[in-house]
Each structure stands twice: as C-alpha cells, then as structure tokens.
Image (cartoon, rainbow, N blue to C red):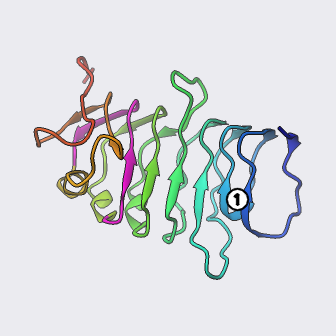
Amino acid sequence: RLPGVLPTGLPPLRLLDMQDNMLSGGLKHWPATVSWLQHNRFSGSLPADPPPKADGMQPAIDISYNNMSGPLPANLDPHLTTLKVMCFPNGKTCIDGTLPSSLGKLTALEHLELANNHLSGTISPALGALTRLQFLFLEENRLSGTLPAGLALIMSRLDDSTCNIEDNCLSMGISKLCSSQQRASCSP
C-alpha cells in the first residue's frame, strides 16, 4: 500500500492502476487513458479535462471510494467506456450537483456507477442515448422526477446484478426495472 501523492509532470500514460493504496492529494488532470484509482485518499474536484488519448485504448475512469467532491465534469471524452465515481455509503465528501445532460454524448459508455453520492435533480432524456450500457448503478442519490423512457428501455434489458437505481425519488412509469425500489418518503 503506497502512501504519498501522484508525481506531477508525468507524461500521459496509457494505463495507471494504483487502486487500493493510500495515495492522497488532488488531481489536476487524469494521469492515464485508463485510470484505476479507486480506494485511495484523493480529494477535491474531478479533473475537468478528458483523459489523454492513446491509440488502441478506450478511456476508462474509476475513482470510487476516495474523497472527491463537486459536480461531475461536463467535458468527458465521448469514447469513455467506464465511469465509476462511487462514494462511501453515508459519506460526507461525495460528488454532488446534477447528472449533466452531456453524459448522453458518451455513446461508448458501457459501465456507469455513480452510487452513494449526493446527485440531485432529474435525469436528462439525453441519457437514453447510452445504448451500450451493460452496468448502471445510481442508487442512494437524491435523483427525482420521471425516469426518461429511453433510459427505462435500456434498463429493461439489465437485471438486479447489473443495474440498481434504488433509494432515489424517481417515478418509474414502468412497474419493474432492475433494482428500483424508491424511498418511502420524498420531499417535494
């Protein structure tokens, strides 16, 4: 388990797997096309710029279980295949704000995990363009409104092991979609 911070001035990397360490500090940019940085002690906002490009590699980001805060960046690489920014359950420092409609431009996205954060507001119909999704985890947020029909259609082909939107304040419009039990009481 490595302590410390990521060195500055690294050239853009193709792959960086530094998961399950004790790395800390902020991230000014994504260090690699594929950045596996989960289970560390990183803090601050997510980098606004997309990951560096590398021939033959699809960008992917996992920065789950750190102390990241602030909104999701609106300027993510449209070729991103994985975006995981999960917070510790009942975490105090988590991603907040809304789900940007620009997520709908990530048409290569297969894996979207944003569970246990402080995301709020409605889900944009633009997320219905994420037709390659194989995993969707948005549980334990503060999302509200009606689930967009396009996203509901995508979710209808996923099961409980690959999809969970429980514990939000969403109106389904469809009786059963993956794990979708909503909060018993939602304030207006």
| Residue 93 relative to residue 11: left or right | left
Q: Is residue 139 magenta?
A: yes
| Residue 12 relative to residue 132: left or right | right
Rendered view: 150 above or below 52: above
| Image quadrant in which you'd find residue 139 | top left
Farthest bottom residue in view:
55
| Residue 78 relative to residue 161: left or right | right
What residue is disc 1 on?
A: 30
Residue depicted at x 26% and y 56%: 125
| Residue 17 relative to residue 188: left or right | right
| Image quadrant in which you'd find residue 157 | bottom left
Q: Amino acid at mark 1?
A: Trp
Helix or strand or loop: what does disc 1 sit on?
loop
Rendered-image quadrant of the N terminus: top right
Q: Position of residue 67 (x, y in %)?
A: 66, 34
Q: Is residue 163 magenta?
A: no
Residue depicted at x 30% and y 52%: 124
Residue depicted at x 24% and y 24%: 188
Find the magenta span and give its range.
Answer: 131-147
Residue depicted at x 25% and y 28%: 182
Viewer-nearest residue: 100 or 180:
180
